[in-house]
Amino acid sequence: MAHRPPISNHVRELRDQHGSMTQAQLGDAIGVTRQTIIAIEQGRYSPSLESAFRIAKAFGVGIEEVFSWDE
Amino acid sequence: MPFQEKSAWVMSVSLILGGAYYFGIVKTITAEIGQLAPPILPTVVLYTIILVVISVVGHIAISILTPREADAPLDEREKAIFQRASHLSGYLLGAGVLLSLGVYLFSYSGDALFYGVFASLMISQLAEYVFRILFYRVSV
């Protein structure tokens, strides 16, 4: 199994704050599948820098408000 | 379940059924003639047909169920999954071929070499799909 970096995110909370945006809608907005959004929310996958910026842009916030490095 | 995971299941089933058919025939002929059966072209052709038919029918079925996902290109996570699965299955293919060559050096049986390499190809291909399924379910 791949080593999981200590990265957490607030994607689910931000989706809820944005009118209950669905995982599929967010996936469409940033160009990934719904399953990849699920994996990101569950911490099973760390997105690329480009996708991380796209997610932040979709919510209209800075990247540091979506992702954080927990040590 | 993502389309690509369903696709990996279809391919795994087709490889298992095709492999079972192929080596079932080889086993039967070997038992009849009392020595390792030589590779037979029609059996290889039938194996290929079984693989193609199951994979085409299976992919048509899953595409009908999820047409939008079937058309979608791989995203970044899926590309990483495919790359990692392919990388690991490559080791299996290499090990199988090396083992087959080693067996040949001791047995000088071209037939055994053929089956060894063919089985290595089947196993590594099956492993690639199994790795994909596994990586879809755990972290990449």
Image: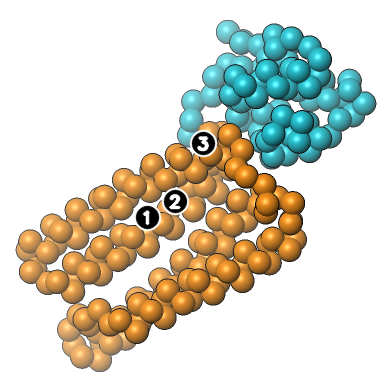
Q: How many marks?
A: 3
- Measured from the top left, where is residue B47 in percent x and y? 41, 76
In the rendered structure, the answer to whether residue A4 lies left or right of residue B40 reads right
Instruction: Note whether B56 is above or below A61 in the view shown.
Output: below
The colour one sees for chain B in the rendered image is: orange
Q: Is residue B127 visible?
A: yes
Helix, strand or loop status at disc 3:
helix
Q: Which mark is residue B124?
A: 1
Helix, strand or loop status at disc 2:
helix
Pointer 2: what residue?
A: B128
Mark 2 belongs to chain: B
- The residue closer to the viewer here, B31 or B23, is B23
Mark found first going from the N terminus, 3 or 2: 3
Q: CA distance from mark 3 to mark 2?
A: 13 Å
- Measured from the top left, where is residue B22 in percent x and y? 37, 77
Instruction: Note whether B98 is above or below B113 in the view shown.
Output: above
Q: CA distance from mark 1 to mark 3?
A: 18 Å
Q: Identify the image's colour scheme: rainbow, by chain, secondary structure or one colour.
A: by chain
Query: Crowdedness of circle 2 by 10 Å Cα count: few (<14), some, many (20+)?
Result: many
| Rendered residue at 22%/69% (across/down) | B114
Q: Which mark is residue B80?
A: 3
Pointers 2 and 1 in contact (CB under 8 A)? yes
Mark found first going from the N terminus, 1 or 3: 3
The colour one sees for chain A in the rendered image is: cyan
